[in-house]
Image: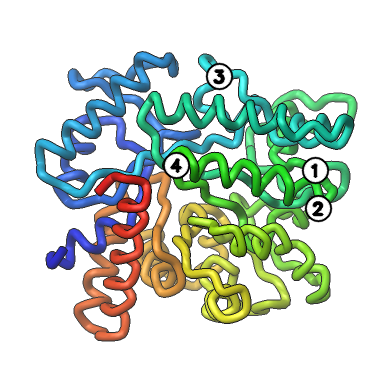
Amino acid sequence: MKNLKEKVGQLFICRTPEDINQIEMFIKEGIGGFMIGKGGEIVSENQAVLEGDSLELLKRFVRLLNKLSQKNKKVPLFLVIDGEGGEYFNRLKSISDYKSPRFYGKKFEKDGNLEFFEREVKKFAKLINQIGFNMNFAPLVDCAKNGYRGYIAEERALVKNKDGLTKSETAAADRSYSDKMETVITLGLTAMRIFQEHNIIPTLKHFPSYGILKKNQNPHRVLPKLELPKNEILAQIEPYRKAFKNGCYAIMKGHIITCLDKTAPASLSVKIDKFLKDELSFDGLVVVDELHMGAIRQYYSKLNSSEEIFKKAAVDALKVNDIILTSYPEDFIIMRDAIIEGANKNGKFLERVNEACKKVLYYKKIINLL
């Protein structure tokens, strides 16, 4: 691949636009993939947004995306689902009974039956294969704290229940397998292995951990800054240490400031990039968590406009990540062009673009897309 524009395009995964013409335009621009998980749209060739997520609709939509990619003679797409499972993070909930991580964690801790969990993951992986997804933003290996309330991802304010949590917060709190590290490691690495055996790239998240966040530290809104000692932070990354030794394909880095770098979030940190490579010996794919979160806006709050923020964030993110995730398709071109401009001005940054593109293509080959 010699075209710089297409090289940079390969480094982006964005939510599928709601218009088929825009989807095809992004494919022509060489985008790396689309997220059809939570927040993704299903669009038909006649422009209508297809409501629901039936098996046939999803299969038809994936076929359409692949047909457009082949028609335009482009690199096959990463087709991504946010398939953690459960009530909220399950795009396939109308056709799959894949339950929340917490459900499986509690059951495993009760009966020690790992075979049940393996069967459940295999069934889900086969369904993903059948539809045509090839990447999953899961498993989540954050070890929850405070009774599974470590990270509340959903923002909607619903009627509170007797525990003082909204319904959506309760669902989001089910994202962690457990507050016991042994359970998180056992189930997380089992899920990782099974997805990889099915030619699906699992993306372990959110490095170093969102499980240690307090209820009011939602990175969708604010940039969390944790005043925790190094030994506590290092304890949280134990699932990653084990996963890296077992051939982990990919991880997602989170927007969180810790003592590992007291000035920049992990998602943008040069120090943490070096830590991953030098101390943890990880050389797989690194995906940056969604760049439109409030944490990123807060970090770049001195910039004058949203456009400036996302241009700067995209360039900084690519310095220490391989794939940029954005849930706002309208900003894909803006962010991509900022990276192209930076690569044309800076030889070292151009090398980083080439390195990331090479890695993306390598993993597309690993799962038989190339």
In the image, residue 143 lies at what x, y percent? 76, 51
Answer yes or no: is residue 136 visible: yes
Mark 4: amino acid: Ile
State the SS at label 3: loop
User: Which is more N-terminal, label 1 or label 3?
Assistant: 3
In the image, residue 55 lies at what x, y percent? 41, 16
Between the residue at mark 2 and the residue at mark 4, the CA separation in whole angstroms equals 25 Å
Position of 80 relative to 352 (above/below): above
Q: Residue at x 48, y 59 (%)?
A: 288
Q: Which residue is mark 3?
A: 96
Q: Residue 200: which disc? A: 4
Between the residue at mark 3 and the residue at mark 1, the CA separation in whole angstroms equals 22 Å
Answer yes or no: is residue 329 visible: no
Mark 1: amino acid: Ser
Mark 3: amino acid: Ser
Q: Which residue is mark 2?
A: 181
- Quarter of the rendering containing residue 281: bottom right
Q: Which residue is mark 1?
A: 178
Q: Are discs 1 and 2 less than 8 Å apart at CB?
A: yes
User: Which is more N-terminal, label 2 or label 3?
Assistant: 3
Name the mark nearer the viewer: 4 or 3: 4
In the image, residue 264 lies at what x, y percent? 59, 75
